[in-house]
Amino acid sequence: MVLEASEDKVVNNRDIQRFCVARQKMQMGREEKLPLIIEGTDHEILFENDALRAIALNVICDFFDQH
C-alpha cells in the first residue's frame, strides 16, 4: 500500500504515481493500482489533525487486517 499526501511539498506526487505504475508492471503491487491519496494532507500524514490522521490510520489498519 502506498499513501500519497495530496498537498505534499517534499515528495513529488507524480513520482509516487510513476513508482506505483512501475510496481504494477513488475507485478509487485497486485492489489493497488495507484497510491491512495489522502486529500488535504501534507507530507507527514500521520502528524495531521485528528480527522485526517484517522483516515490514514483506518486505511492502514484495514490493510493489515486483510494481509
Image (cartoon, rainbow, N blue to C red):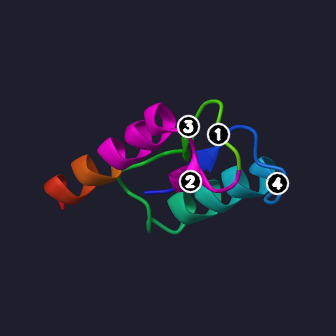
Q: Nearer the viewer, residue 37 or 22?
A: 37
Q: Are marks 2 and 1 in contact (CB under 8 Å)?
A: no
Q: CA distance from mark 4 to mark 2?
A: 19 Å
Mark 2–mark 3 distance (CA, rounded to whole Å): 13 Å
Q: Is residue 54 above or below residue 18?
A: above
Name the N-terminal-most of marks 4 and 2. Answer: 4
Q: Which residue is mark 2?
A: 47
Magenta-colored span: 43-59
Identify the element where label 1 is drawn: loop
Quarter of the picture holding the C terminus? bottom left
**Residue 41: mark in rendering:** 1
For badge 2, the amino acid type reads Phe
How far apart are the alpha carbons under marks 3 and 1? Answer: 6 Å
Instruction: Specify the principal SS of the magenta part.
Output: helix
Q: Which residue is mark 4?
A: 12
User: Left or right: 35 with respect to 43?
Assistant: left
Disc 3 is placed on an element classified as strand
Residue 22 higher or lower than 39, as above or below:
below
For mark 3, what is the residue? 38
Q: Position of residue 8 (x, y in %)?
A: 76, 48
Looking at the image, residue 60 sits to the left or right of residue 52; the answer is left
Q: What is the three-letter code of the residue carrying label 4? A: Asn
Mark 4, mark 3: which one is toward the viewer?
A: 3
Q: CA distance from mark 4 to mark 3?
A: 15 Å
Q: Residue at x 46, y 43 (%)?
A: 53
Whether residue 67 is situated above or below residue 39 in the rendered picture: below
Mark 3 vs mark 1: give the one in front: 1
